[in-house]
Amino acid sequence: RFSKAIITSGPTIEWIDPVRYISNASSGKMGFHIAESVSKWVSEVVYIHGQVLENYKNPKGSKSIAVETTSDLCNSVLAEIQTDTILIMAAAPVDFRPAKSEKSKIKKEEGNETFVLELVKNPDILKTVSSKIAKEEISGCCLVGFAAETDFLEEYAQNKLKNKNLDYIIGNYVGKNEKGFGEVDTTVFIYSAFGKVAQIGPFSKEVISDKI
């Protein structure tokens, strides 16, 4: 059915200065295993990853592309997507970036107990792709998003599904007391425009990736 699959994976980073950046705790493990699973039934698989460990950089059967920032990730997705592509956005792109990235390391100033960092919104990758589909620049695509939430998962997942015009969204709980980011087992909930499709887990991310 699909001639190409694009799987994104891992966190992006946004530089504050040459030694500090904004990121998140995504490991990239889920996206890596999804790419390996998808390569069994789609002939061309492109794996676009952020800052992941070495063992999550090159899944079997995929072309691997490394990116750094959310804008880099967006540009790579737009360069690769075409008609009859399934896009699975398993990456955890940073939603905001510093309005200005300093060229020199920011120094602590004596007597200054606070530091204000102005942030601006990053591009919404799935919305950008949805817009291309709406304009009929590409067709026959399937868009699958992820929602990693600390609470109100179903509500937030359904909102993302609708607002980004997705075909499916895969949600899971994350945070200190939940099994989501990282190396642990997890449970995911798959939603479509018609409601909850499936609940998978708790299983390892390898098992969940095959079942997705």
Image (cartoon, helix red, strand yellow):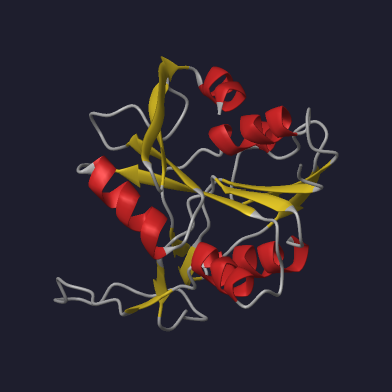
Vertical placement of 143 versus 19: above or below?
Answer: above
Rendered image quadrant of residue 187: top left
* Residue at (46, 80) in percent of width and height: 102
Q: Give percent across and percent down for residue 72.
A: 63, 67
* Residue at (47, 79) in percent of width and height: 101
Rendered image quadrant of residue 129: bottom right
Apparent side of residue 10 relative to residue 177 in the rendered image (left or right): right
Q: Nearer the viewer, residue 84 or 31?
A: 84
Q: Give percent across and percent down for residue 119.
A: 34, 76
* Residue at (72, 53) in percent of width and height: 85
Q: Nearer the viewer, residue 5 or 54?
A: 5
Outermost residue toward the front in this view: 194
Q: Give percent across and percent down for residue 181.
A: 41, 35
Quadrant for the N terminus, please.
top right
Vertical placement of 77 versus 111: above or below?
Answer: above
Quadrant for the C terminus, please.
top right
Vertical placement of 208 versus 122: above or below?
Answer: above
Apparent side of residue 156 relative to residue 14 in the rendered image (left or right): left
Apparent side of residue 45 relative to residue 21 in the rendered image (left or right): right
Rendered image quadrant of residue 99: bottom left
Q: Give percent across and percent down for residue 200.
A: 43, 22
* Residue at (77, 33) in percent of width and height: 39
Number of marks: 0
